[in-house]
Image (tube, rainbow, N blue to C red):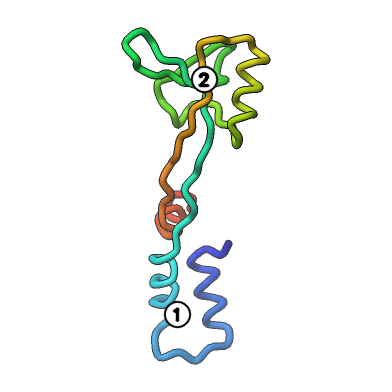
Amino acid sequence: MLNRDELIQLMKSGYALDVSAEVIADRILATVTVADEVGWLIELADKQGVPSYHQLEYDDDWTSDANKALRFARREDAQAYIDHIGWTEPKPVEHMWPAASLQESGAQHE
């Protein structure tokens, strides 16, 4: 995927435009979004119903932060992991992380 600077260079390399390449690149990047990320986590609720999620930082470690949890692409993969470990209480749960616009995500990665 092109970043803003690469898009500007591409547009400058052969187009005579009434509007600057920078303005067009900003307009394009402002309207395009990256798809939401969906994944399956292994969740274990405590007696009050507060969820925690399995992570691999330590051997048998749990976190309340879904962003730090081990993610699986498919429910059946999360369930297979649970079955392999032999857990009976944890369950696979689907989570979604909303996508940022390309311009926002580009700013985070630069």
Tag shown at residue 91: 2
Left or right of residue 74, residue 7 in this image: left
Badge 2 amino acid: Lys
Q: Residue at x 41, y 25 (%)?
A: 65
Tag shown at residue 21: 1
Q: CA distance from mark 1 to mark 2?
A: 50 Å
Badge 1 amino acid: Ala
Image quarter hosting the N terminus? bottom right
Mark 1 falls on what kind of element?
helix
Image coordinates for residue 109, horizontal then vertical, percent: 49, 50
In this view, the residue in front, 18 or 98, is 98
| Whether residue 67 is situated above or below residue 34 in the rendered picture | above
In this view, the residue in front, 8 or 43, is 43
Image coordinates for residue 79, horizontal then vertical, percent: 61, 23
| Whether residue 101 is situated above or below residue 61 in the rendered picture | below
Q: Residue at x 50, y 68 (%)?
A: 5
Image coordinates for residue 15, horizontal then vertical, percent: 53, 88
Q: Residue at x 45, y 80 (%)?
A: 21
